[in-house]
Image (cartoon, grey):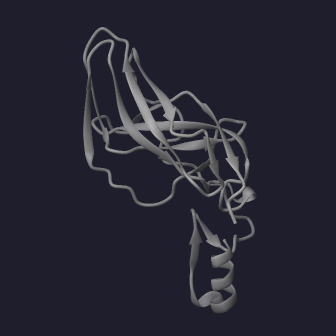
Amino acid sequence: TELAAELHRRFGGAVEITIASFKYPLEPGAQRREPPGGVVSTAELPGVTLSVELENDVAPSGGLFRGLAWARNSGPTTVQLHTAREIGGYILDEAGRALAGYFGFTFAAGRTLVIQPGQRKSVPFFVGMDSYDPRIGTVLPPGDFELVVVLPLGGRPREQLVSRPTRVTVTPAAT
């Protein structure tokens, strides 16, 4: 935000600055954003669960959490999941709503996971700290939070699997 402040000071209204999903400087009355699809599982896939394996459960404010999302099939039949090559997720507030995530472009090239009964397959994920809530600013502040990963199912319109929450810690950004 220091760069945004400097650009705004130098150029004023001649440039439009966006940080995460908000215009800079934050406009009075800016509204909380909701992620497309929300943060609940909408797919009905009995026996299929999604879990998270983090590279590190601590990251600096403004950084990324990375790891693997594991889709496990504990059902009796083979499951095919059509999804992306890398997926995202959200940091949740106390009410279970998305507080932060990643805003930007991703490559949505498809991938099909064929999971036999009793097997699991992984998909890389990343979760950013771009704010959905203007009350906390444009980037998630330091603190302890819950993280969920969302596995969109491309072959099923508007369906997704969401992992159980995993505890993470956000530390102050390095200066």
Where residue 134 sits in the image (x, y, percent)? Answer: 70, 59
> Which residue sits at x=39%, y=41%?
124
The one nearer the camera, 141 or 157, is: 141
Where residue 143 sits in the image (x, y, percent)? Answer: 74, 45
> Which residue sits at x=63%, y=88%?
13
> Which residue sits at x=65%, y=59%?
139
Quarter-wise, where is residue 1 in the image? bottom right
Quarter-wise, where is residue 72 in the image? top left
Image quadrant containing the C terminus: bottom right
Quarter-wise, where is residue 12 in the image? bottom right
> Which residue sits at x=40%, y=22%?
44
In the displayed structure, 99 sits above or below 54; it is below
The one nearer the camera, 37 or 166, is: 166
In the displayed structure, 42 sits above or below 7; it is above
Relative horizontal placement of residue 110, taking residue 100 as reference (left or right):
left
Where residue 173 sits in the image (x, y, percent)? Answer: 68, 59
Where residue 86 sits in the image (x, y, percent)? Answer: 37, 45
